[in-house]
Image (tube, rainbow, N blue to C red):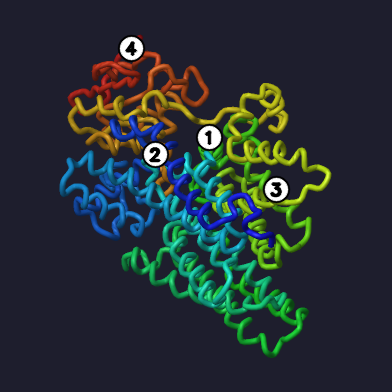
Amino acid sequence: MMPERKELFGRRASYRLVFLVAVLVYLVIQSKFAGEFFHQLRLPDNDDAMRLSSVRDLVAGQGWYDTRQYRALPPEGVLLHWSRLLDAPLAGLYVLFSAFLAPKAALTATAAIWPAAVFLVYLTVVGRTAKAAFGYSAASFAMMAASAMPMISGNFFPLGRVDHHNVQILCMLAICAALISPGRPAVRGAMAGVIAGLSLAIGLEAITFIGVAGLVLTAQHVLGRPGGTERLLGYAVAMGLTAPVLFLAQTGPDGWGQLYCDQLSGRVLAITTAAMLFAIVLGFSRRVLAGLPARLVLALVLGGLALAALWPVLSPCRAGPYAELPPEIRQGIIGNIVEATPVLRLFAVVPGMAMEIVLPLCLVTLLSLLRLAAGPGAAFPRESRHALGVVLVFLALGVAGSLYQVRAFVWGLAVLPLGFGAVAAWLANGDWGRLWPWKPVITVALAAVTLFPSFLTRNTLAMKLAPALEPSGAAARLDISDKACNAPQELARLNALPAALIMAPLNLGPKILLYTPHSVMGVPYHRSAEALLSGVLPFFGDAPEMEKRVQAYRVDYVLVCAGEVYGGRADSMGSRLARGALPGWLEPVEIGGGPIRVMKVLRGANGELRDGDETG
């Protein structure tokens, strides 16, 4: 490795200074939204609102094992698949702040402190891991990337981000860190296994990442890498023991026999147990099977047997979480969820967003591959080469996953700062030979594209070429409706009404629950097909569909956002209500202005909907 004094940011003092600068950059980025957040408790999305509602209910006395939201589709409520293990620290902060703040202020403080604290831990792990694997210079560049990349600090760690995705990103980074950090392989593997068990308990978004980590460790064992077997054993055994403990910690006795596909349950425990047994057999066989071919054959045979044994348990999950919905509705809902969209379709529909998501990931993946192809040397020892190879596996996993659903890019995003740090240090400190005059220009250009991809969204040519990536005839609209109505100050107008059951479009349900005392019909969570459909069909369909549900559930008010077109149809029931065309059984209610249209349901003496001609 080159002497540290010749490297940009190659000293310990520089590393510490960059850490402080990275924290400052994060705070500056958050300050842009701080006014709105602290004044209104404006949250990034629906999941954050539902998480805070669940935390508030837990503190108010709802049972630890009871994760239903009872104000959604009452009286039964909607069962959420989220983990109480994440609700617990948020509830602790809320109780702490409630001791000296009003309830709303305590909730706001909780939603501000939590993502900042998680980011601080994430930044620390990024710096320490990159330093151990690639040196001080790479660690400094990595921390800069973690704080400046819009998809990291701006999307997953902003003020109010209390859903579980930032914790999952931290878990994935920590697993990768344990895989590539030197020393004590069994301990490092066990650390990764415990974190993997925690990740599975919080949610299953990282299960593919966790599985690929196991494959990486299996490959190290098969190839006879020093410490590979110990790290594999530590990982699989720790995960196999941690997962059931956390399962019992967050699942009541009535849920032990439920074989869910969307949370830690018997199905996932079968996988972690099989992985533990797989690793134990490989570990005990290493002295008998000393050659690479024998180890490879045994690993393939055991893997095949495990897959055959698990297939009957796992095959019901292949249809996905929306399997119970009618096919036409399922396609309509999935097709309108941004995070479930393949990245090529997203690029055609919202090219600026697609560029910010995948361009840095693709670029760092390519540069990491080029760095490995350049070969080892004094500035790139074998251990650093191996570490970058592992990081590259996860970067490529994120790129490949985004082709299926854009949300899968987080598999690569979690380790993106590590890859950026390694290649940025290479570009900044490497010997460019005859190309040295171009070194500053190329290095700065690549860093700018990676850290600030949004400037490319102003490229008119790129915007015109984007639709070429979309298959002919495919839908070209994503559901981003009701944005004008989901602001806290607009929804707070509903507090002028007595507590009631409101039928509202799907995008507004969770925030109505958080900002008002009302109950809602529709929320975007797949455990309840009825809750999903109740936020879509009445507005996307015709009058009879809305009438049927209003009458069946005794809805008090119907709500739409003025000027919206629901379901892409100007004649849909939601679109007609949004422009003021009301049936005889609805009358407008004044709530003090704003874009929200509220209509009261009118009933006759026997409770039936009142007849009358459409008005407006």
- Closer to the chain start, of discs 1 and 4, is 1
What is the total number of numbered labels drawn onto the structure image?
Answer: 4
Q: How far separated are the C-alphas under marks 2 and 1?
A: 15 Å
Front label number (2 vs 3): 3
- Closer to the chain start, of discs 3 and 4, is 3
Residue 484's x, y, as percent? 40, 23
Front label number (3 vs 4): 3
The N terminus, quarter of image = bottom right
Q: Residue at x 71, y 48 (%)?
A: 367
| Mark 1 touches mark 4? (CB < 8 Å) | no
- Closer to the chain start, of discs 2 and 1, is 2
Residue under numbered circle 4: 613
Residue 14's x, y, as percent? 53, 52
Residue under numbered circle 2: 46
- Closer to the chain start, of discs 3 and 1, is 1
Asked whether 2 or 609 is in front, the reply is 2
Element marked by disc 4: loop
Is 418 above or below relative to 570?
below
Q: Residue at x 35, y 9 (%)?
A: 616
